[in-house]
Image: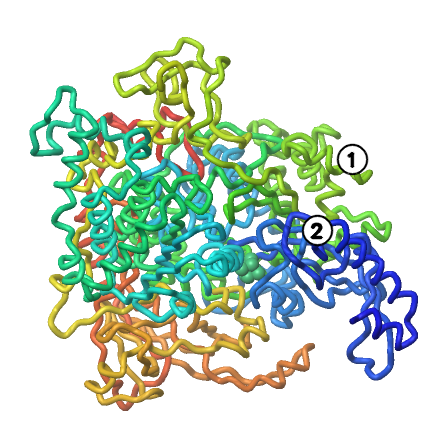
């Protein structure tokens, strides 16, 4: 054992301490590391020693040289999972030596994927941006001068103030990729009184979100994989799916406990390799398979009759005379009548039908249905990105998947699926500015009244159409030229000062979009900034705290640090301090009513600081935290700085069954469906910030719950208060044919393809890459640095290509050149290419470890991108950059995709109908050609598929008020203009 070894080496003091710790912990708790992890964690430093943790210096071997570390928790920012990290800060050098997992974090439980520890690469990245930069020359010319934070802040603040004063508030836009913080910037924008939030969600996950929201009013599922009997995944959970590491480890826990794992993936993903049943359906046919399973459960009476009768909104469905053809046995129709209708409705979805659509053997689908039927209420399922982000109508995949949960009653049960907000904790902030008094038509155009999020990826087209222009445009953790489809249209927009007056890129690193900025402002990476966040990793609620680890370390050592620029490299800042300072400068005298939301409560007249901001939240908004902190003689903020996470509540259970108290029943009215409306409805569930409540009535009442005899139960945050098998919203807003879970042919259904076309899957990535932020993560780059085209052996034979041969992939607007990777791990006839590669730069300025140097050629609307140089070793402050051995950087395929906005969810439908052929002799890997005139044509074709609010809104509003929106305008601005 370790301690014997230490004793043998004469280190008796440490050996004894370690022995005592471990023996005590074992006897008291039967685990090595107690705490919210609740698992056997032998290898973590006991938290009592985090102020001075000793390890031997591996570089000094064979000498036994000790190094002393201060261990400071923070939160990883390299994907949405928000896993806990523990920074090992050398007490002598004051530098971070490494990042490991934080055992105090209830979501990640001390574990990380490769990207977590690689945060260190980002901190020490020799190519990172260290100072504020201002453009010289034309946009995109690559000429920059260093400027000061003061100059940048004053210039930007003056522009925004002018736009607000001149009532051009729709010309200020903040466009975010990964937010990382729960609602901070949304509140800043609300403080400015602008509806200027724009997100990347419609190129990411809106498809699934729409499907889930239609059922349960909330847009994300929280599956309890660890306790499931059957797990069904339509996503790549073990490599890059939603809440990758926290969910992946719980999927494996579930399997270890005997759960059967079913995976639908056209490609042999890492998740599929762990499956008991892996099927590779034709892309877009997944909903047909799910409905065949549903039909099997319905036909054989294998569903949870009591749950369906109680919690589905079937009464609303049978009350719609146009939605069925059967006669009722009773009047009003009984549940038994509804069951007859249900059987009839789904009878066409036979295993044979599903087999015909998907290409999967009918017997296999039947076997899967039989396994699903054994799950009962322990059926956990998840669809994220994958096909729901790939095809038109992809949202129906999530909807049809949750249909099975709803049939089995596996909703908010142990081993089932919870609505996300029930397993997430969002504390009340220090200030809540009012909803903006405006509606931004550039982000929420009338054509997409039901879109899940902002129509962000259409921005160049909407601006080119003359619908709007931007005065000040921010991007943050976002690189639309590279990430979005149709990147050349983004370049055309950003290069035009008549469309975008001032573009500010907030970024730690160079990226393809930042090259077209007016200001490039250096922001901290994950361990250099503050945020709080909470995610639905399992049936629990926890709060994580991201913090600048060097600030906390220096504070532990007694230093007084006010501003993260004092501890970060160069003049790197953190966003939250930046936003507070910018808000302050927009309204220095307070005359616009904005400054008050950035003002200290402790010291009125001075700007609010981040310490006070978080101190207020932890003191006032997190139940149980002050008491727990007090037990350790800590303030709540000190507790969060010490441990990085707090478990608010474990095991949440069925909030829909919660009984509504009398205090909420003022002036109650009950309708024919048992919905109770009152004037005193409170937010559902344990969250302090209100969950979205459904529409109320004309007299100002809001839905409080559902009446069952003498009891009123909380229900779900949908307009009906129940799970919505029938979406009155879709029915009333012009899509009655999709009012119940259904399957329809997507834009890449075989009926919609030319004979020589196939499907390209572009919605996956490898587990070790992070999009823009990973290009200079050397440990990750060494593992993965290319993205060849997956092509099945039979397909490759037809084209007479072998692995490494170059192929041309032709889309509707151009083509790209990529080497083949011949594999049996994909459905024959379908091709796939990971979207995490193909980074490029125009000059030496950039992330040199994974950005190829390219040349752009333009002839009118025709654009070419040619690689000039691949990746090469280079001299820097990091000796490892001389050891770079990889040359490839992959291909930037997204640029060759036109926009495909789903007319309902607004999701960009990523799958492409393509032609794949051998490359021309003059082609080189990474070459791209695009005609943006064709992009415009495709945009118009998809726009014509919409059913705009002007024509279809049932109540002359722009959008159903109950539907989620990251930043909601005041309710009166939902009204369409007369
Ligand atoms: S899954 Fe990996 S990248 Fe994502 S937060 Fe966790 S450690 Fe970081």
**Which residue is located at x 44 percent, y 10 percent?**
666
Q: Residues within 10 Å of mark 2 (few under 14, many from 20)?
A: some
User: If you read the primary sequence from the N terminus, does the residue marked by circle 1 or circle 2 appear first?
Assistant: 2
Residue sitting nearer the eye, 171 or 72 = 72
- Pick the quarter of the image with the C terminus: top left
Residue 522 relative to residue 929: left or right:
right
- Location of residue 479 in the rendering, given as x and y in whole percent from the top left corner: 45, 60
Q: Residues within 10 Å of mark 1 (few under 14, many from 20)?
A: few
Ligand 1 within 8 Å of the CB at mark 1: no
Residue 198 relative to residue 905: left or right:
right
Q: Which mark is residue 34?
A: 2
Q: Disc 1 marks which residue?
A: 630
Q: Is residue 29 above or below residue 305?
A: below
- Location of residue 779 in the rendering, given as x and y in whole percent from the top left corner: 59, 75
Q: Is residue 844 visible?
A: no
Element marked by disc 1: helix
**Which residue is located at x 82 percent, y 38 percent?**
633
Using the numbered discs, state the Cα–Cα distance from disc 1 to disc 2 in whole angstroms: 19 Å
Residue sitting nearer the eye, 282 or 126 = 282
Element marked by disc 2: loop
Q: Which mark is residue 555?
A: none
**Which residue is located at x 51 percent, y 49 percent?**
537
- Location of residue 642 in the rendering, given as x and y in whole percent from the top left corner: 75, 48
């Amino acid at each position: 054992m370790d301690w014997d070894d230490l004793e043998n080496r004469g280190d008796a003091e440490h050996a004894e301490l370690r022995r005592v710790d471990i023996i005590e912990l074992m006897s008291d708790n039967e685990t090595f590391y107690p705490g919210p992890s609740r698992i056997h964690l032998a290898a973590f430093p006991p938290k009592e020693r985090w102020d001075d943790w000793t390890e031997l210096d591996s570089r000094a071997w064979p000498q036994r040289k000790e190094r002393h570390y201060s261990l400071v928790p923070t939160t990883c920012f390299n994907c949405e999972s928000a896993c806990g990290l523990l920074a090992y800060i050398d007490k002598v050098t004051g530098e971070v030596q490494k990042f490991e997992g934080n055992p105090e974090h209830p979501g990640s439980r001390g574990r990380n994927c490769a990207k977590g520890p690689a945060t260190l690469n980002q901190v020490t990245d020799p190519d990172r941006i260290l100072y504020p930069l201002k453009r010289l020359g034309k946009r995109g010319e690559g000429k920059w001068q260093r400027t000061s934070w003061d100059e940048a802040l004053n210039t930007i603040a003056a522009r925004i103030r002018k736009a607000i004063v001149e009532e051009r508030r729709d010309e200020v836009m903040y466009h975010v990729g990964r937010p990382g913080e729960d609602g901070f910037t949304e509140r800043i924008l609300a403080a400015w009184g602008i509806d200027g939030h724009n997100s990347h969600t419609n190129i990411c996950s809106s498809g699934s979100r729409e499907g889930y929201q239609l059922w349960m009013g909330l847009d994300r599922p929280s599956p309890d994989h660890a306790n499931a009997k059957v797990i069904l995944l339509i996503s790549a959970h073990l490599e890059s799916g939603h809440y990758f590491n926290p969910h992946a480890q719980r999927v494996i826990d579930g399997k270890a406990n005997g759960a059967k794992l079913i995976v639908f993936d056209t490609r042999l993903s890492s998740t599929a390799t762990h499956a008991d049943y892996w099927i590779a359906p034709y892309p877009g046919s997944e909903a047909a398979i799910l409905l065949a399973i549903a039909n099997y459960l319905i036909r054989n009476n294998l569903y949870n009759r009591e749950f369906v009768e109680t919690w589905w909104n079937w009464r609303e469905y049978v009350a719609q005379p146009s939605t069925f053809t059967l006669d009722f046995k009773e009047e009003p129709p009984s549940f038994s009548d509804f069951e007859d209708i249900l059987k009839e409705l789904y009878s066409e979805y036979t295993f044979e039908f599903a087999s015909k659509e998907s290409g999967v053997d009918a017997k296999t689908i039947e076997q899967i249905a039989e396994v699903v039927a054994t799950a009962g209420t322990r059926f956990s399922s998840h669809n994220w990105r994958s096909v729901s982000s790939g095809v038109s109508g992809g949202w129906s995949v999530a909807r049809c998947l949750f249909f099975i949960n709803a049939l089995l009653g596996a909703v908010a049960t142990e081993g089932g699926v919870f609505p996300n907000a029930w397993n997430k904790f969002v504390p009340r902030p220090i200030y809540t500015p009012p909803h903006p008094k405006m509606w931004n038509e550039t982000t929420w155009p009338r054509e997409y009244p039901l879109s899940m999020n902002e129509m962000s990826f259409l921005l160049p087209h909407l601006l080119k159409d003359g619908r709007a222009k931007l005065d000040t445009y921010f991007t943050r953790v976002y690189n639309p030229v590279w990430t979005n489809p149709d990147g050349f249209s983004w370049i055309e927009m950003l290069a035009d000062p008549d469309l975008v007056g001032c573009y500010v890129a907030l970024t730690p690193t160079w990226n393809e979009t930042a090259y077209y900025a007016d200001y490039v402002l250096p922001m901290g990476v994950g361990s250099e900034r503050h945020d709080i966040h909470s995610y639905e990793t399992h049936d629990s609620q926890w709060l994580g705290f991201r913090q600048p680890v060097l600030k906390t370390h220096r504070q532990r050592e007694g230093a007084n640090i006010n501003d993260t620029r004092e501890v970060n490299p160069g003049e790197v800042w953190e966003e939250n301090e930046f936003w507070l300072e910018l808000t302050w400068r927009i309204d220095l005298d307070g005359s616009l009513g904005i400054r008050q939301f950035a003002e200290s409560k402790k010291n009125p007249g001075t700007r609010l600081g981040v310490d006070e901001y978080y101190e207020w939240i932890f003191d006032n908004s997190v139940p149980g935290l002050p008491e727990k902190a007090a037990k350790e003689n800590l303030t709540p903020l000190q507790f969060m700085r010490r441990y990085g996470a707090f478990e608010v509540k474990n095991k949440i259970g069925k909030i829909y069954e919660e009984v509504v108290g009398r205090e909420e029943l003022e002036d109650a009215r009950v309708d024919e469906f048992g919905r109770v409306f009152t004037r005193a409805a409170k937010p559902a569930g344990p969250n302090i910030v209100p969950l979205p409540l459904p529409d109320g009535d004309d007299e100002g009442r809001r839905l409080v719950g559902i009446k069952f005899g003498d009891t009123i139960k909380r229900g779900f945050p949908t307009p009906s208060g129940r799970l919505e098998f029938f979406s009155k919203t879709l029915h009333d807003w012009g899509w009655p044919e999709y009012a119940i879970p259904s399957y329809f042919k997507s834009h890449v259904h075989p009926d919609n393809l030319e004979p020589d076309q196939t499907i390209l899957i572009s919605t996956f990535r490898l587990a070790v890459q992070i999009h823009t932020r990973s290009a200079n993560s050397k440990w990750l780059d060494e593992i993965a640095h290319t993205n060849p085209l997956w092509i099945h052996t039979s397909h490759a034979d037809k084209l007479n290509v072998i692995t490494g041969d170059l192929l041309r992939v032709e889309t509707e607007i151009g083509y790209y050149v990529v080497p083949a990777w011949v594999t049996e791990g994909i459905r024959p006839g379908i091709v796939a290419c990971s979207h995490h590669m193909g980074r490029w730069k125009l000059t030496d300025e950039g992330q040199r470890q994974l950005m190829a140097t390219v040349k752009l050629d333009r002839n009118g609307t025709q654009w070419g991108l040619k690689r000039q140089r691949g990746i090469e070793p280079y001299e820097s402050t990091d000796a490892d950059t001389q050891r770079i051995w990889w040359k490839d950087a992959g291909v930037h395929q997204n640029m060759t995709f036109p926009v495909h906005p789903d007319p309902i969810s607004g999701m960009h439908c990523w799958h492409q109908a393509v032609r794949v052929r051998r490359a021309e002799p003059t082609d080189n890997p990474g070459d791209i050609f695009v005609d943006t005139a064709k992009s415009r044509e495709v945009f118009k074709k998809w726009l014509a598929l919409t059913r705009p609010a002007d024509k279809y809104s049932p109540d002359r509003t722009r959008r159903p008020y109950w539907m989620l929106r990251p930043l909601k305008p005041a309710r009166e601005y939902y009204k369409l203009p007369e």
